[in-house]
């Protein structure tokens, strides 16, 4: 269930949004910030892609291998700015201490009455920048924003701050840059984020931390076409309640000669990349591109202005990381319930997880299908937990060769799927190919079980054996029951070995279950049918 | 295939020239084919360049009205008709 709430689309989340708002606005920022710690810890342990993205960036920015403290700080910084967005959007700026550096460039520009491009990034909080620009300085700002993938956020914004809502230029469609042109013509400072490429967007190669990346050409090229200045802006979060806004004039005019347009554009874009790198070194924990930023191989881009970005959208990782408002809301609620019951509700679940881990047998009489849940591979190899599960499945097969084994688990890291590695492991143990089936698309426990349900079909699904690690049994059973599956559980290890790491796993599982149960209750209560459909 | 009218051909030439569509001949553009996304595969940057070129040559500003643009940018034929209607020189 690690990510199930995260996969919920934004619609149907209005209730959860209201809950978050209520907590943030009524209980206050200190309470909200206290909740950031468990949330950060949770992400650090579960959001693998985001954690790797963080590591890849910090390694370059800090010039050393990031420690756990660095990574915690990185994710905490992100979570803190997300929480602060609520205050910014609702106009509660009295909470904050805001310093403006280089503001003259932007005030001068606004004073001329002519528009410009405000080029920002996912370094720090762009939200802070525009709210402060609008409210404190009364600057005429409009922002290019992708509103389509986030209709609930858009509605929230409308409700919280109608003035702000009118300042958005939606991205997508041929008319986007025409709107930018019009706005600049009317004297607006048009904000755009220049550090991420959408799939299919035109991009050009730049150097960033000494390596190649691809950046979108649209912001600077449109400034050149429209004939307006480009001002860089970075809204850095400096911890506590301090934000620091940096403004710098990049170009009074970007003049491109048609014949050398591509090279000249490249020079301007490189200047942007250099300033981005400068500020990213200065405030590394403000880097909110939580994916492998250097993955988009720009080699294919060299030599053609019309070349477009390929590959998957970084949004996928971002969405997974940010897990949607439903996930955040129910996690907050779960934490509040824990606090309200002085941890008793968590203790009760811990007891349950522990009892199941201890009492479940390692042998079963049931014949038919044996389903083995995959475990994340370590450097493409089977981990110790996974080996244990596979050995148990092999023992079950040897006890009754009529049994068939189904391995489930997609490529959660690296190139090969968990199921395929598991199959190779069992083949190496001497099991025949005919006894093994694999399902190598699913990415987490809930997905595993959902696909198992499809694969085994109606006839088989009443009775099959589910092999998993002892600590994982309680979660697997609860999720299976939610899907109306009734497996016979079989523990991978002979007996429960109690040491610190196992206790920690059990506590973590209890945390998951607490979140799951609170989330389910919340969904039922708010009749959030969409999220219920996901887990049943 | 549908033949281009002389004015459609003129707009097609402007399109190919402005956007540097090197491998496309103006007379080969299908008049009813979509210009954006599918078809010619133009994007928002192209739309802006096109609008700037049109304003220079035909003397009117394209507006960013979404409804209208969906119609105007639907095909070469629709675009040509719009230019013919709005042009001031």
Image (cartoon, coloured by chain):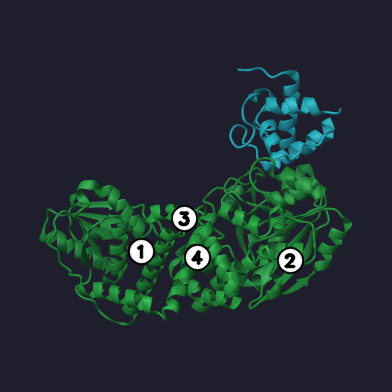
- Is the same chain shared between marks 2 and 4? yes
Q: Residue A275: where, in percent of width, then height?
A: 71, 65
Q: Is the C terminus of chain A in the top left, top right, bottom left or bottom right quadrant?
A: bottom left
Is A210 on the left or on the right of B20, as rendered?
A: left
Q: Colour of chain A?
A: green
Q: Colour of chain B?
A: cyan
Residue at mark 4: A329
- Nearer mark to the viewer, of 3 and 1: 3
Per the model, the C-alpha gap separating discs 3 and 1 is 26 Å
**Which of the two discs, 4 and 1, labels the residue nearer the N terminus?**
4
Measured along the vertical axis of the image, is residue A331 above or below residue A218? below
Residue at mark 1: A377
Q: Chain of mark 1?
A: A
SS for callout 2: helix
Q: Chain of mark 4?
A: A
**Which of the two discs, 3 and 1, labels the residue nearer the N terminus?**
3
SS for callout 3: loop
* Residue A64 visible somewhere in the drawing: no
Q: Chain of mark 2?
A: A
């Amino acid at each position: 269930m690690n990510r199930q709430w995260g996969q919920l689309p934004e619609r149907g989340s209005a209730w959860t949004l209201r809950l978050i708002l209520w907590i943030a606005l009524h209980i206050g920022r200190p309470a909200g910030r206290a909740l950031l710690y468990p949330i950060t810890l949770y992400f650090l342990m579960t959001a693998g892609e985001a954690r790797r993205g963080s590591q890849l960036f910090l390694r370059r920015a800090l010039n050393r291998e990031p420690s756990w403290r660095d990574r915690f700080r990185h994710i905490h910084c992100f979570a803190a700015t997300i929480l602060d967005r609520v205050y910014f959007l609702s106009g509660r700026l009295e909470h904050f201490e805001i310093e403006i550096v280089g503001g003259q460039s932007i005030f001068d520009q606004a004073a001329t009455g002519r528009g410009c491009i405000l080029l920002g990034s996912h370094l720090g909080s762009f939200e802070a920048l525009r709210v402060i620009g609008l409210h404190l300085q009364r600057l005429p700002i409009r922002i290019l924003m992708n509103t389509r993938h986030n209709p609930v956020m858009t509605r929230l914004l409308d409700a919280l701050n109608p003035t702000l809502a009118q300042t958005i230029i939606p991205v997508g469609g041929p008319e986007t840059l025409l709107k930018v042109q019009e706005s600049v013509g009317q004297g607006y400072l048009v904000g755009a984020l220049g550090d991420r490429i959408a799939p299919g967007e035109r991009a050009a190669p730049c150097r960033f931390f000494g390596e190649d990346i691809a950046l979108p050409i649209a912001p600077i090229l449109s400034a050149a076409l429209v004939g307006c200045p480009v001002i860089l802006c970075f809204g850095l979060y400096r911890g506590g309640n301090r934000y620091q806004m940096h403004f710098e004039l990049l170009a009074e005019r970007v003049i491109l000669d048609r014949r050398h347009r591509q090279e000249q554009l490249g020079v301007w874009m490189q200047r942007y990349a250099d300033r981005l790198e400068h500020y990213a070194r200065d405030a590394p924990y403000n880097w909110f591109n939580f994916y492998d930023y250097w993955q988009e191989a720009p080699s294919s881009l060299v030599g053609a202005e019309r070349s477009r970005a390929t590959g998957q959208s970084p949004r996928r990782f971002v969405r997974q990381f940010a897990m949607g408002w439903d996930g955040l809301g129910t996690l907050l609620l779960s934490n509040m319930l824990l606090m309200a019951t002085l941890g008793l509700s968590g203790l009760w679940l811990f007891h349950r997880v522990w009892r199941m881990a201890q009492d479940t047998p390692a042998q079963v009489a049931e014949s038919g299908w044996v389903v083995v849940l995959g475990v994340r591979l370590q450097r493409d190899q089977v981990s110790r937990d996974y080996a244990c599960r596979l050995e148990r499945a092999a023992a079950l097969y040897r006890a009754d060769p009529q049994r068939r084994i189904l391995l489930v688990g997609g490529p959660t890291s690296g190139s090969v799927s968990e199921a395929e590695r598991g199959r190779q492991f069992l083949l190496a143990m001497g099991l025949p190919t005919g006894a093994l089936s694999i399902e190598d698309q699913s990415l987490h426990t809930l997905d595993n079980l959902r696909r198992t349900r499809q694969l085994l079909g109606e006839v088989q699904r009443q009775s099959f054996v589910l092999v998993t690690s002892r600590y994982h049994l309680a979660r697997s059973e609860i999720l299976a029951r939610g899907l109306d599956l009734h497996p016979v559980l079989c523990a991978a290890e002979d007996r429960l070995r109690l040491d610190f790491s196992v206790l920690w796993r059990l506590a973590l599982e209890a945390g998951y279950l607490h979140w799951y149960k609170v989330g389910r209750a919340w969904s039922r209560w708010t009749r959030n049918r969409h999220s219920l459909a996901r887990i049943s | 295939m549908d033949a281009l009218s002389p004015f459609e051909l003129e707009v097609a030439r402007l399109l190919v020239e402005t956007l540097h569509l090197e491998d496309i001949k103006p007379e080969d553009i299908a008049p009813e084919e979509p210009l954006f996304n599918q078809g010619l595969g133009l994007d928002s940057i192209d739309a802006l360049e096109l609008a700037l070129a049109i304003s220079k040559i035909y003397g009117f500003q394209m507006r960013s009205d979404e409804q209208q643009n969906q119609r105007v940018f639907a095909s070469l034929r629709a675009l040509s008709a719009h230019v013919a209607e709005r042009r001031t020189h």
